[in-house]
Image (cartoon, rainbow, N blue to C red):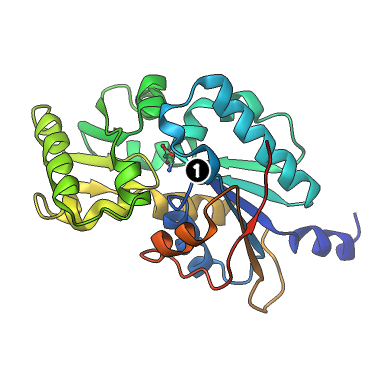
Amino acid sequence: MSTLSQNNINSRPIGFFDSGVGGLSVYSKFRKALPNENTLYFGDLAHLPYGNKSFDELVGYARNILNFYKNLEVKAVVIACNTSSAQAYEIVKNEYDFKIYPIIQSCAKVISEMKLSKIGVFATLATVKSLAYTREIQKFNSKISVMEIACPDWVEIVEGGLLGSKISFKSVKKHLDEMMQFNPDKIILGCTHYPYLLGDLTKFYPKDKFIDPSGIFVDFIKSDLDLNKNDIIGYEKFFVSADAEKFVNNGKIFYEVKNLPEIINLG
Ligand code: DGL
């Protein structure tokens, strides 16, 4: 392959996706770490929350978004969604000729090397059901005990603009009390929406009790990706399947989306 065509491939965009604003907790770190990359983001708000959807539905959503990105000639796709990584990734991973980065599988090795013996995981119902965190972490260290607890109302708290409310504190306390019976060394925020709740969670426990995998994830992608050699700031474009304004407003904690996303119906 000539240098010119390799450069062209490297300057192709990277597509991110999540059910909503959750993936922005990953995307914001990625833009900071790799500002020259061209990036796309798809928020599938029409199907929110992913956490209570069936396996077949989740595979269908992932395929629709991956096909959409295939048509846009991306060089890679980042699954900035634990639920989709847990349920759909293994099924779709060999169906495309670009790299696909799933959050859980990309972070498990680093987490397993943190010298922890008991790890708690807060995640969506679908992620917990899959036991993907337990399986992926124990692949690297079978001595680590993992306890996964579903927090089905947390995505609605973030997407419904309820952070810092009584409803949020009550729910956060309930799930923390349940988790503390296991007495974990650290708790993984195993849904990309959950770092939005850190302000509420840290009313009860210090920030270093929690692992937000987004930083580990971005480091992993950075070490693996064929980087864009251009030294100009990369372009970005946002798409949603519904609720463009809500997406911009609720996402502000992590990322300021300057133009209203384009609404795309992928079925
Ligand atoms: N933010 C996604 C995750 O990491 C999906 C949450 C949802 O829509 O239930 O699992």
**What residue appears at the point 51 percent right and 45 percent down from the top-left corner?**
45
Ligand 1 quadrant assignment: top left
Residue 28 lies, with reference to residue 96, above or below; the image says below
List x then y, in percent, for residue 133. Answer: 37, 29
Extreme right residue here?
2
Examine the image and state in which quarter residue 165 appears. bottom left
| Res. 184 visible in picture | no
List x then y, in percent, for residue 240. Answer: 59, 52
Three-letter amino acid code at disc 1?
Ser
Residue 222 lies, with reference to residue 177, above or below; the image says below
Residue underneath mark 1: 19
Q: Secondary structure at mark 1?
A: loop
| Res. 220 visible in picture | yes
In the rendered structure, the answer to whether residue 223 lies left or right of residue 123 reads right
**What residue appears at the point 12 percent right and 29 percent down from the top-left corner?**
178
**What residue appears at the point 41 percent right and 56 percent down from the top-left corner?**
25
